[in-house]
Image (tube, rainbow, N blue to C red):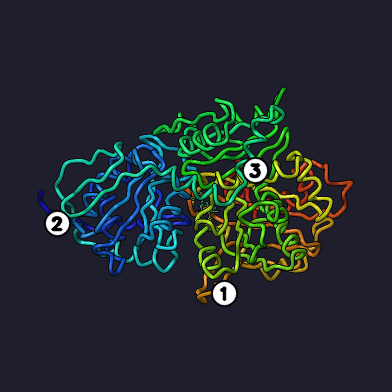
Amino acid sequence: MNLRTVATTPFEDQKPGTSGLRKSVPDFQKPHYLENFIQSIFNSLDGIEGQTLVLGGDGRYYNRTAIQTILKMAAANGIGKVLVGQGGILSTPATSCIIRKYETFGGIILSASHNPGGPNGDFGVKYNISNGGPAPEKVTSAIFEQSKRIQAYKILEAADINLDRVGTFKLGTMEVEIIDSVVPYLELMESLFDLEAIRQLLTSGKFRMCMDSLHAVTGPYAKQIFEGRLNAPKGTVQNGEPLEDFGGGHPDPNLVYAEELVELLFGEDAPDFGAASDGDGDRNMILGHHFFVTPSDSLAVLTANAHLVPGYKDGLAGVARSMPTSAAVDRVAAKLGIDCYETPTGWKFFGNLLDAEKATLCGEESFGTGSNHVREKDGLWAILFWLNILAVTGKSVEELVREHWQTYGRNFYSRHDYEEVDKAAATELMDNLRSQFTPLKGQTFGFYTIEYADDFSYTDPVDGSIAEKQGIRIGFTDGSRIVFRLSGTGTKGATLRVYLESYEPDTSKHGEDTQTALGDLIQIAKDVAKIQEFTGRNEPTVIT
Ligand code: G16
């Protein structure tokens, strides 16, 4: 076995985005591209020699190839041991769970999350730190700095490791342990939820559920949990076989991309409960019989009912939501008398709040919900949380949500995405909005008067770090909001996200269609941001 030091030159585009480095597979296949980024991670981490790392991915195309390369580079860089998910598969929340359980130095997750896969799809690399969560900005910035001045990387010349056999192997002096990742994850779920109550619900003959893994990473986990441990009928998990191209689908659990599940839940003879998760298993979508739960409402409902769930029955330290997420959870927090934190988009911003025990539950409008049990959002955890509440209350999803609105009022909420627009035009649109902050204040559009217009900036209450320009907010005097952001996870052009929210306390109006209720705000957003003028588009590509 030979240790090689390979000369290389920097790539200029290795700046991690909202969640790690995401590029197309052909980008990652460029000679030295993956190696440069991995070496930059190793170079940026002090004291990594002799340490243990976790490594796995969502099973997308290039996962296995990348894992073999990373293992050989880890061995050449003096890493002591790497724990790898069997078959190279590890969901993002399971990776977080394993980092925490085995107290490893960190972990590398190979995923482009909800982005499509396959030879022309996307791939991604994310580094997680020892708390199990995404690397904070100071770490990702250090990695980026290393990537700009890299001149060489180290790699061991060795045969590939068999990723499919559980066991311990040697790669040079480094140990590689292939582990079954479902077992530690299931153990963690056992410690949080009343699985017996859920099992009784699922086997009662009176309740039917469908879980759609969208041919992505949660398939093996979901089958073992729902059809195995919880005795749900075979076939409860659909699209449960992880495929390298996700069966040609877009592994994003929303109303547009999880259409098979949506058709089922809104069709004739629909089941009582439907759920989906994304490419790497951290996102979730919750559906009831002919009913969609927005991620913002989901966070609020989980918070209001957490006392019914064993792992959270002693109360919540606090809650946190990303800024564009609706304020539904704020109302629950106020009633419970706990703090509610508003962070920038990106799960990494919750890490400090969770570590400092300031927040117990966290959530984002982008179909992410999680808690302090790991340091990532967790799709299957959210689904089990919902099932636990349904099992204890005996209510339907719709009943729970409607009763919630009766108590707290309804935050009508929607996100409009304009995908793959010209990057320069999208940047100009944002800059143009910024230039209008002062004149916009006090302007009236029909019933709505603008109270403030600003750029959201966040000071972390734990370490004082500051994140600026985290989305443009336009707030109205009645509490309604429009938020504009450019996505940090896309790989083609730019994606303009427009988040719309209005609050309705009047129960008699809670049945209104969301897009109708938000109609005026939708038009104001288009006019104020001059969306058509800058992007050439008048309608969004995805509405959730
Ligand atoms: C990532 C982050 C989330 C963020 C989402 C959307 O999710 O972990 O915190 O909300 O991206 O980000 P953006 O609006 O910038 O595209 P995931 O599931 O892609 O890892």
- Of pointers 1 and 2, the one earlier in the residue sequence: 2
Tell me if 390 is positioned left or right of 445 in this view: left
Does residue 527 show up? no
- Of pointers 2 and 3, the one earlier in the residue sequence: 2
Amino acid at circle 3: Thr
Q: Which mark is residue 5?
A: 2
- Of pointers 3 and 1, the one earlier in the residue sequence: 1
**Residue that numbered label 1 is attached to:** 461
- State which quadrant residue 142 falls in: bottom left
Q: Nearer the viewer, residue 534 or 58?
A: 58
Does residue 408 show up? yes
Q: What residue lies at 55% left-to-right and 45% top-to-bottom?
A: 379
Q: What residue lies at 76% left-to-right and 53% top-to-bottom?
A: 411
Q: What residue lies at 39% left-to-right and 50% top-to-bottom?
A: 109
Do the CB atoms of the residues marked 3 and 1 lie less than 8 Å apart? no
Amino acid at circle 1: Pro
Q: Nearer the viewer, residue 342 or 156?
A: 156
Label 3 Cα neighbours within 10 Å, binned few <14 / some 14-19 / many ≥20 = some
Q: Position of residue 390 (x, y in %)?
A: 71, 42
Spatial separation of the CA atoms under disc 1 and disc 2: 43 Å
Q: Position of residue 322 (x, y in %)?
A: 60, 60
Q: Between tags 1 and 2, which lies in front? A: 1
Label 1 Cα neighbours within 10 Å, binned few <14 / some 14-19 / many ≥20 = few
**Residue that numbered label 3 is attached to:** 544
Do the CB atoms of the residues marked 2 and 3 lie less than 8 Å apart? no
